[in-house]
Image (tube, grey):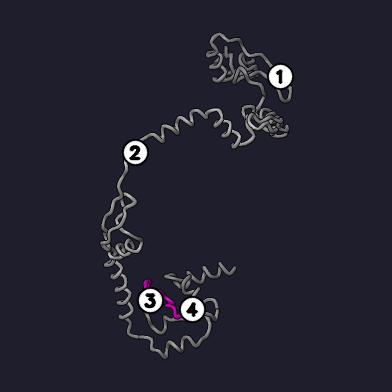
Amino acid sequence: MTKNLCEWCGKQFAMRPKWPHQRFCSKHCRRKNENRRGHPKPLPRACRQCGRLFTPARMPLQLYCSATCRGTHWYINNVQKPAPARKCAHCGESFKSRSWVKQFCSKVCQQAAWSKRNQFKIREAGRKHRNVKRPLIPPIYEPCAQCGAVFHVRAANQEYCSLRCRNAAAYEANRERELARVHRRIARKKAVIDRLTQEQIIEKLAVGYCFYCGSEERLTLDHFIPLIRGGATARGNIVIACKACNSSKGTKMPNEYLGQLSMELA
């Protein structure tokens, strides 16, 4: 297989049998040669970091032979090299900074220098602000949508005089839905034939420890299978649970809560 040198990048490549007059190793080099618009072919140059000779193939002003050399050169000159000392343009104190644009040691000096440089503009703006005649907006008083008391309106969409009236209005708006939920719970309790008597409740509490964690403090009665999941207020569905376990279990099934409890204890 015949080999030739690329006229753009100088790399050696294998010529294809279909193209006996192939001049470039790839489409990229061929397009670079077509778009150079009369510019001379880039000459080999030394890498600024490692010193190795290379021919710029991508950019005519390429200074490094690879991205590794470019990153190494930047790291040496920006991280390892100590920042030069500069003099603050306002207070005159010395500070270190790698940015040649930075003139002040802190934000306070920068704002103080700006105020000193624009003090006449600041005075003129303050004078114009004081001389502007603004219309006086009278206070607006409206009756509360809940209790009817007249109050000072401080916002455009304020309808209630206090947080208490707003909460009361929200409760009244959702009262039917809340009562329906309570009635469904009561109905589930009343549908149970096997009710717990006072003696049975005392007998249950006499066990003396939580069914789930074994604690002996703040014991309560808990539905083993929650009412919302099909449980009943029956003697066989009531267990003793401490306040923490009863609150954490919520509407979970026993196997779900015991699995969660075992993971927390592990």
Tag 4 and tag 1, C-beta contact below 8 Å: no
Q: Which residue lies furthest to the bottom in this view?
A: 199
* Between marks 2 and 3 in the image, the one whose residue lies nearer the viewer: 2
Q: What residue type is labelled 2?
A: Arg
Nearer the N terminus, badge 3 or badge 1?
1
256 and 48: which is toward the camera: 48
Q: Is mark 3 on a helix, strand or loop?
A: loop
- Give the distance between the C-alpha atoms of the residues marked 2 and 1, in whole angstroms: 70 Å
Q: What element carries label 4?
A: strand
Q: Which residue is drawn at 53% across and 10% down?
A: 37
Residue at screen point 48% across, 86% down: 205
Instruction: Identify residue for label 3.
Output: 231
Judge whether 81 appears above or below 139 on screen.
Answer: above
Query: Dot 2 corresponds to which residue?
Result: 134
In percent of width and height, residue 34 lies at 53, 13
Going by the numbered disc 4, the residue's amino acid type is Ala
Region of the chain picked out in magenta, as a range: 220-231
Kindly identify the residue that appears in the image at 27 percent across and 63 percent down. Answer: 147
The relative height of residue 239 versus residue 20 in the rendered view (above or below) is: below
Residue 93's place in the image compared with 264, above or below, is above
Q: Is residue 83 left or right of residue 175?
A: right
Q: Position of residue 228 (x, y in %)?
A: 37, 71
How far separated are the C-alphas under marks 4 and 1?
80 Å
Mark 2 vs mark 4, foreground winner is 2
Residue drawn at (58%, 31%) of the image: 113
- Where does label 1 land, which residue? 46
Q: Nearer the viewer, residue 21 or 264?
A: 264
Residue pointed to by mark 4: 241
Task: Name which of mark 3 and mark 4 comes first in the sequence.
Answer: 3
Name the mark nearer the viewer: 4 or 1: 4
Q: Is residue 160 left or right of residue 210?
A: left
